[in-house]
Image (tube, rainbow, N blue to C red):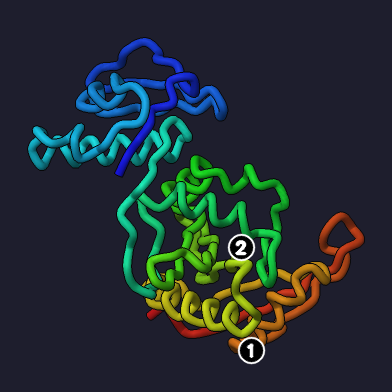
Amino acid sequence: MKFYIEREAFTAVEPAKDAIPLKALRSGCALFLNPSAAPLLATHGWVDFEEFAADAGAPLRRDFEDALTALECFELAKVAEREARAGNDCRVAGEKDYAAVSAFIRAHMACGHSYSPVANPEYYSAVSVRARQFNNSDYHFMKERGGELIAVLIVTVPTAGDVSSVVTLHAAVFSALLNKAESAACLHDLLEFAELEFKEEFSTFRFLYTDAKQDAMLSMLLDEGFTKVCTLEKELNKTIDLVIYDLYRGLAP
């Protein structure tokens, strides 16, 4: 793996106790790194990570990896030649996945059978994706094949303290290389995986339908067992009907 610190993308701010504070110039966001990240920030040009961390012990190496992950997420560093993952599994995005998830969504959100209610790609920047999942608002479920990301399902959960047992499907993004049947298979796997993740707290998946742009997504969800619950007439802007489709799985005890 090689990395490149984009010095022109951030400024250092007044040092904080036990932290290195940076301001990302593109987003205006603040990032606080462990002081052990100082050697990382002092590098110039493309650097081989294995050579850079050759003399570091395991704890310091992990600090370097965590700092580099955060810098990449905030678009303050570039990473290349990362070791490829293997497998065809579903999983929840983690700290090292936000940059890849963001890039995938923005590249494929308007392709094929994908659906997203937000047209602005910046809504899915790595920083925004990380913030929403970190704050337990959205969860990003990933589907991989041969180590390559091929689908992402975004599920919005109730805010802390809310007694609702319903989670809402915010978006589903599929690789432009997938046909409808392959996209539907990915959606099936991701829903099953999400069900296992949520079974202790929630009982129902919900999809909110408002216009024909969602027809491809709705077709796949109906095949998964979603049923129409009701239509709220002129619910949005006093002119648009909101149709609610649910899949009750009895997930919660």
Residue 168 falls in which quadrant of the image? bottom right
Which three-letter amino acid code belongs to the residue tagged 2? His
How many numbered marks, from 0 up?
A: 2
Q: CA distance from mark 2 to mark 1?
A: 18 Å
Question: In which quarter of the view is residue 62 placed?
Answer: top left
Say which residue label 1 marks: 223
Crowding at dot 2, Cα within 10 Å, few <14 / some 14-19 / many 20+, comes out as many
Residue at image point 27% right, 27% down: 40
Q: Which mark is residue 170?
A: 2
Q: Amino acid at mark 1?
A: Asp
Front residue of this view, candidates 154 and 109: 109
- Where residue 99 is drawn, which disc sits there? none
Image quadrant holding the C terminus, namely: bottom left
Instruction: Identify the residue shown where x is 39% and y is 63%.
Output: 92
Q: Position of residue 152 (x, y in %)?
A: 52, 65
Above or below — where is 209 with respect to 97?
below
